[in-house]
Image (tube, rainbow, N blue to C red):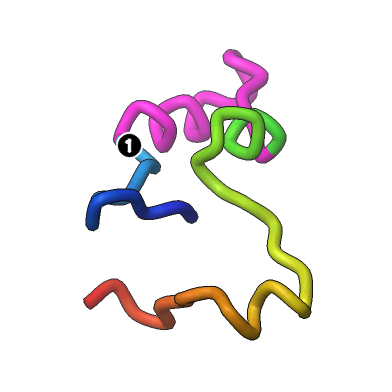
Amino acid sequence: MIVEKQKLLLKQRHVDLLKEREYTNFGWQNLVAEGVVEFIDCLEEETSMIAMVPE
């Protein structure tokens, strides 16, 4: 999940759309397309700031 300016880009509307996935057809690919989540490879993880807990 992406954080910008110390704020999580994942919003409640995204969670609601995922809960209603059967009706909205909203899924993982939509989160990636909207820039809410991002894949990183093993080389990127060495230089990325990755939080293991939400603190």
Residue identifier under label 1? 11
Where residue 15 sits in the image (x, y, percent)? 41, 37
> Which residue is the extreme one toward the top?
23
Percent from the top left, x then y, of residue 47? 58, 80
- Callout 1 crowding tier (Cα within 10 Å): few <14, some 14–19, many ≥20: few
Magenta stretch: helix, strand or loop mostly: helix
In the image, residue 37 lies at what x, y percent? 56, 48
Residue drawn at 48 percent across, 33 percent down: 19
| Residue occupying image coordinates x 32% and y 36% | 11
Residue beneath the point at 69% across and 57% down? 39
Task: Look at the picture and state if 23 lies above or below 1.
Answer: above
Residue at the (76%, 78%) spot, across then down? 43
Describe residue 12's horizontal placement relative to residue 50 as left or right: left
Q: Which contiguous range is marked in magenta?
A: 12-28
Say above or below: 6 vs 55.
above
Q: Quick one: SS at disc 1?
A: loop
| Residue nearer the viewer, 13 or 39 | 39
**Is the C terminus in the top left, top right, bottom left or bottom right quadrant?**
bottom left
- Asked if residue 24 is among those painted magenta in the image, a careful observer would answer yes
> Which x, y percent locates residue 24?
58, 15
Seen in the image, is 33 located left or right of residue 15?
right
